[in-house]
Amino acid sequence: MKLGLSTCLLLAQQLYAKIIYAGVNESGGEFGVFSPGNPGTGLPGRFGIDYAFINKSTIDIFVDQEKINLFRVTFLMERMCPLSFGLGSRFNETYFSEYADAINYITLTKGAYALIDPHNYMRYNDPSQQPFSGSVIGDTSDPKAATTTQFGQFWKELARRFVNNEKVIFGINNEPHDMTTQLVLANNQAAINGIRSAGARQLILAPGNGFTGGHSWTQTTGSGDAPSSDFMNQLVDPLGNTAIDVHEYLDIDFSGSHSECTQPGPSNLASLTTWLRDNNLKAVLSEFGGANNANCFTFIDDLLAYLAANDVYIGWAIWAAGPIWGTASPCCGPDTGSLEPGQFNDLGQPDAFTTVWPSAVRPNIPVQDLKRSGISNLG
Ligand SMILES: *[C@@H]1O[C@H](CO)[C@@H](O)[C@H](O)[C@H]1NC(C)=O
Ligand SMILES: *[C@@H]1O[C@H](CO)[C@@H](O)[C@H](O)[C@H]1NC(C)=O
Ligand SMILES: CC(=O)N[C@H]1CO[C@H](CO)[C@@H](O)[C@@H]1O
C-alpha cells in the first residue's frame, strides 16, 4: 500500500507516545486552613508560613535535571477572593502577586508550562474541612453559595491576567464532588465562556464529578449523581482547546491515602479511554500517585505506560511536591514523604523524590516528546 505523506505523519503520530506534558503537582498554596469546626482558620494566612507555592530552587531541579515541563500549582479561592469581597473579579492583590510570581517563574523564567489550579472542589466560602465544607458553587438552594455567574467572572478576571502568557493552562477546579453533574457542566461552561471572553486562547482542563475520578467517569458517583460521561461531552469551547481533567489513585478506594497499590490504572481507565475516543476528546491525568514500595512502582509504571500507549491522553502530573510538605506524605500512606527534592519522610529518610521518582516516574518521562514552546494546546 502506498501512503501519502500526511497519512504517514498521522501513522507516525499514532505509533509514538502522545504525552506532551509531564510533571508534578506543587501543593502548598491551599494549606493552613484545615480546622474542623473553625471556619476562617488560616484566612488570609501568612505567606511562607501557612501557605507557599513553590521553592524556585526545586523547580530548577525538576526542569534542568529531570526535564519535566508541567507544574500544577494549587491555590485557594478564599484567599484569591477573600470572603469580604466574594467570589468574582476582585482579587487580593497580595495573594495574586505571590501566586503570579510562582507562575511567572515556572513559565517565563524556566520555560515550562504551569497548570493553574483553584483547589476548591467546586466549593467556596469555607475551606475548613475540605473537601466537604463550603457551599457548592451555583447551588441555588443554598443562600450562601456563590453563583455560576460569579464563577465565570472569577475565571474571566484570572484569564485576563494571564492572557499574554502562552505557557499557562487553566484548570477549572480541583475535584468537584457530591453535586449534580448538570451543575458541574454548567460551572465548567461558565468558566470556559469567561476565559474565552477575556481573549485567552490557552488550553483549558475541565473536571468531572466524583472527585473527577478516571475509574468512575462513566459511573454514578456520590449520592446518585449522574456519570460525568453523560454530560462533559456537551462542553462547548469555541477554540476547541479544552481537554478533560482526571485524577486516578491506585489504592483500594482511589483516595491516595494507603501505601498499598491494588487498583490497576489500565483496566480502571478503560471505559474513560473509550469515552474519550468516542467523543474525540483528550485528557490530562493531573493527579495520581503511589507509595515507596516495589508494588506501587509497578502500578505507577503500568499506569504511565498505559497513558503513553493511548493517544487520548496528552499529559500527567504526579501528586505532589511543594515547599511546605515537610515530613508529611502527600501520597500515599505515612512513610513515603513528598516529592520535594531535598526533604525527608517522617522516619527521617529521604523522601519520595529519592525513591518513587527514580523508580517509577523518571523512566516514564518522554523527554524528547514534551512540548517546550508555543501556546498550551492539545498537541
Ligand atoms: C491579602 O493577602 C495578604 C497576604 O496573605 C494578607 O496579609 C491580607 O490580609 C489579605 N487581604 C484580605 C482583604 O484578605
Ligand atoms: C529550597 O530548595 C533548596 C534545594 O532543595 C533547599 O536547599 C532550600 O532549603 C529550600 N528552601 C526552602 C525555603 O524550603
Ligand atoms: C494522596 C493525596 O494527597 N491525595 C490528595 C490529592 O489532592 C486531593 C485534593 O487536595 C485530595 O483530595 C487527595 O486526598
Image (tube, rainbow, N blue to C red):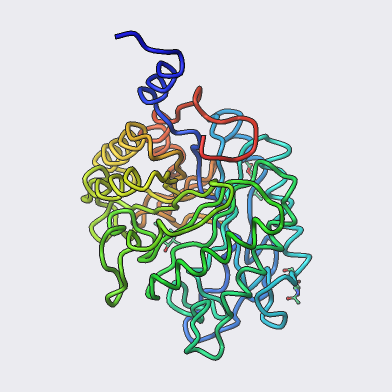
In which quadrant of the rendered view does residue 42 lie? Answer: bottom right
Q: State the image coordinates of residue 227 (x, y, percent, origin top left).
A: 30, 64
Q: Residue at x 35, y 62 (%)?
A: 228
Query: Would residue 146 appear left or right of 178 to someone viewing this image?
Result: right
310 relative to 50, above or below: above
Q: Is residue 108 above or below residue 46?
A: above
Please give left or right for residue 298 compared with residue 98 in the image. Answer: left
The residue at the point 41 percent across, 32 percent down is 358
* Residue depicted at x 58% and y 79%: 147
Q: What x and y, as percent, mark residue 145?
A: 55, 84
Quadrant assignment, res 11: top left
Quarter of the displayed picture in which ligand 1 can be seen? bottom right
Task: Judge from the rendering whether residue 49 lies leftward or rightward of residue 296; answer left or right.
Answer: right
Q: Nearer the viewer, residue 336 or 255?
A: 255
In front here: 241 or 257? 241
Of the 4 image quadrants, the one containing the N terminus is top left
Q: Quadrant of residue 161?
A: bottom right
Residue in the foreground of this view, choosing between 96 and 11: 11
- Counting from the top left corner in percent of width and height, residue 308 is at 36, 32
Total labels: the figure holds 0
**Residue 304 location, x and y as percent?**
35, 37
